[in-house]
Amino acid sequence: MTVTYTARVANARFGGFYKLLLLWRGSIYKLLYKEFLAFFLMYLTLSITYRFLLNENQKRSFEKVSIYCNNYANLIPVSFVLGFYVTLVVNRWWNQYLCMPMPDRVMCAITATVHGTDERGRMYRRTLMRYCSLSGLLILRSVSTAAFKRFPTIDHVVEAGFMTRFERKKFENLRSSYNKYWVPCVWFCSLANQARNEGRIRDDQAYKMLIEELNAFRGNCGMLFHYDWISVPLVYTQVVTIAVYSYFLTCLIGRQFLDTSQGYPGHDLDLYVPVFTLLQFFFYTGWLKVGEQLINPFGEDDDDFETNFLIDRNFQVSMMAVDEMYDDVPILVKDRYWNDSDPRPPYTAATLSQKYLPSFQGSTFDMAIAKEDMQFQQLSEIEELNEETISSQFPLLSRLLQGVGASPLASSVALSAAFVPPGSRSSLLKRSINNIWGSSNSLYQENSQDLLPEPLAEADEGQPITPLFHIESQQFLVPSKEAAPSLVDTIQASQDGETTA
């Protein structure tokens, strides 16, 4: 059975993980103690032989071999190779669990789409669900040793009630050398089509949803089959295994404590137990054992998937959902908070402190801003673009419009400005044409009379006003906004004015 310890570490506290070190079932101690004892006994045997059984010449030769092994042991890239291998195996292990054929989505789809409270409608739903469970059972007994031991033959599958004898005959009459876990899925599709023709499935959309859920279930079964078929490349597993064991075989000789009287570098201390070498063996070999255990999670190790439990659970839950629970809905009543616009479920005494915790409002909720930085600025106080603040970016256009300004934007504003009296040398108005003519898009609606120069504002209403603007003490006629000419006509008028002058 899978070892579950998450409840023991629900809260992070001092010494919380120390209690896990005392567990035996599913622990690294249970998985590694035999290899650890074998390594320690081999090291102890070499140490006793070197200290008490060899003569002086043999000791000198052994010491040279030991120093040589210790110098070149680190050339074996154990941590690099082992780290990538275990990462690959753990990702593969979790993906295999995600592909376990769980019938929950299919059973909900059957309950929602296959209708009928009579015996035939009930038979449709139960048979469809049984075909789905049969397909999951066939693939699990193909990849899991525990499931195969429980259902070693098709006769055991028939006796367990997943398949009838007539269905067994049809299943065995299908001549195929490949795994036939997909056959019940085909039966499912044919039976669903028959239910659609009889009106048990009321529309094509419901039929489409049912088949899509079945295809998702069948896809998980197919992925389990492919994970069992396509393993991690054997060469990778061999390289990792050889690297780990060859490294520690080298350490058996290279990590021996040599005679301190010989003055070998790094051998100033003589101990009988190599503590750090044993720890290194425990970590690296334990890492390798993790990969060995997780590379096939469908065995009978402590942390392998409990396939027989999943078979029982899936079959019992799915049959209950499509049969006993079909059309069995509780009475529709008003909930407890029917008239409460701010429903708040109660807290127990153990969780009362969590009620007063502030809710998250966003990362900028508590940001402080200076009071003067929160004042809105009026648009009239913002400096607008004019010929002094914008540098010329179009020299050719500025050359054509000599005297209008250095900026093309300022020139267009000047061309659109109206009612400049002849003979005056006033600066160009720094307002947009929309504001001048009272456009609805303007933020501030102003009276066009307020924008007129003072002499024109006092003119008689009956006196015609000649719209002009002044450019380098030369006056040119410009029509009003309703009949404004194009830029080319303006340039032509400028040239005619120069000729007249």
Image (cartoon, rainbow, N blue to C red):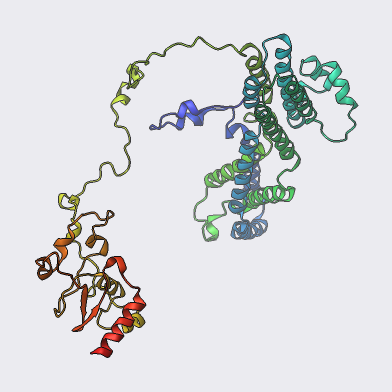
The one of 16 and 491 positioned closer to us in this rendering: 491
The one of 141 and 387 positioned closer to us in this rendering: 387
Residue 110 in percent (x, y) is at 66, 22
Q: Is residue 315 above or below residue 54?
A: above
Residue 305 in percent (x, y) is at 65, 29
Q: Which quadrant of the figure has residue 477?
A: bottom left
Can the viewer see residue 393?
A: no
Q: Quadrant of the N terminus?
A: top right
Residue 413 in percent (x, y) is at 26, 70
Q: Residue furthest front?
A: 462
Q: Residue at x 13, y 78 (%)?
A: 424
Q: Residue at x 70, y 51 (%)?
A: 239
Q: Residue at x 18, y 84 (%)?
A: 473
Q: Quadrant of the C terminus?
A: bottom left
Residue 13 falls left or right of residue 217: left
The one of 316 and 105 positioned closer to us in this rendering: 105
Residue 348 in percent (x, y) is at 35, 17
Tag count: 0
Q: Is residue 19 above or below residue 476?
A: above
Q: Residue at x 58, y 51 (%)?
A: 79
Residue 110 falls left or right of residue 174: left
The one of 36 and 289 positioned closer to us in this rendering: 289
Can the viewer see residue 206?
A: yes
Q: Which quadrant of the figure has residue 326?
A: top right
